[in-house]
Amino acid sequence: MKLCDSLENIDFVMSMVLPSDVDQSTADRFQMEATLNYTTKPIIFVSYDFSGCLDCVEMAEAVMGGAESLSKNPLIACYINVPTGLLHNEDSLRKLLFLAERNIPSLYIPSSTEGATSPITTAGAVALDYAGVLVGLVLSQLKREGAPIIVPGMSPGPLDMRTAVNPYCDPEQGIMQSMAKFYGLPMFSLGGASESKTVDPQAAAEASLSLLFETLTGSDLIHDLGYLESGLTFSFSHLVICD
């Protein structure tokens, strides 16, 4: 968080990784606490369940001086993953509706995998993902007209059936970005990452090209800078290079 806070071209902060070696019932709360303590930039947070989302919002309200202040000037947004475009779990929907009511932005992201939980063809995967995106959009607006919502401008490429790994910087993401622009919605995309396992010329080239591509397509939020090895590892050095 401190590193992101000090980098000139980083405009918002996420946790970078999700802790898995601690108590999962409270990990998201401690993660939010650390983020609020160590950055002055807007925050995109992740909560493991609905109660975690409530607690994280309450913490942000304490920082902002109350629920009304946070609603008028939301410094946070919640990243919500749903399994696929056709499956919306209860916790995700409760988060979406609660945040819409509070005027806090939601990032509603179907996390389908081409060839595993969605069709392996790009057209089929995009159709499935955007069916899910439109579910989130419609529900949030029914709850509160004008509720802020951000949609994905990214999609994992076809699953490698031999390694069960998705390409992290695949060009298919451009189609998702085109869909977001077609609907006139703010988009959340991926750049500055690499398939390389270390900081090397491959990592620099893939990160540079992906960031250029995201910029040219008009992405509103670009995340996962500094990620390596198809999103399995993270490098502080690579993050600085991306900045």
Image (cartoon, rainbow, N blue to C red):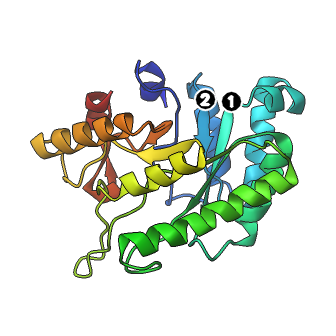
The residue type indicated by label 2 comes to Pro
Give the residue drawn at x 32%, y 71%.
158
Q: How many residues crowd mark 1 within 10 Å: few (<14), some (14–19), many (20+)?
A: many
Pointer 1 residue: 75
Above or below 40: residue 34: below
**SS under mark 2:** loop
Task: Report x, y in % for residue 218.
Answer: 44, 36
Above or below 186: residue 8: above
Q: Is residue 121 left or right of residue 48?
A: left
Give the residue drawn at x 84%, y 42%.
102
Q: How many residues crowd mark 2 within 10 Å: few (<14), some (14–19), many (20+)?
A: some
Q: Is residue 77 left or right of residue 171?
A: right
Q: Quick check: can you spot residue 209? A: yes
Task: Report x, y in % for residue 81.
Answer: 59, 61
Give the residue drawn at x 49%, y 31%.
1
Foreground: 128 or 22? 128
**SS under mark 1:** loop
Q: Which mark is residue 42?
A: 2
The residue type indicated by label 1 comes to Leu
Which picture quadrant has residue 148?
Answer: top right
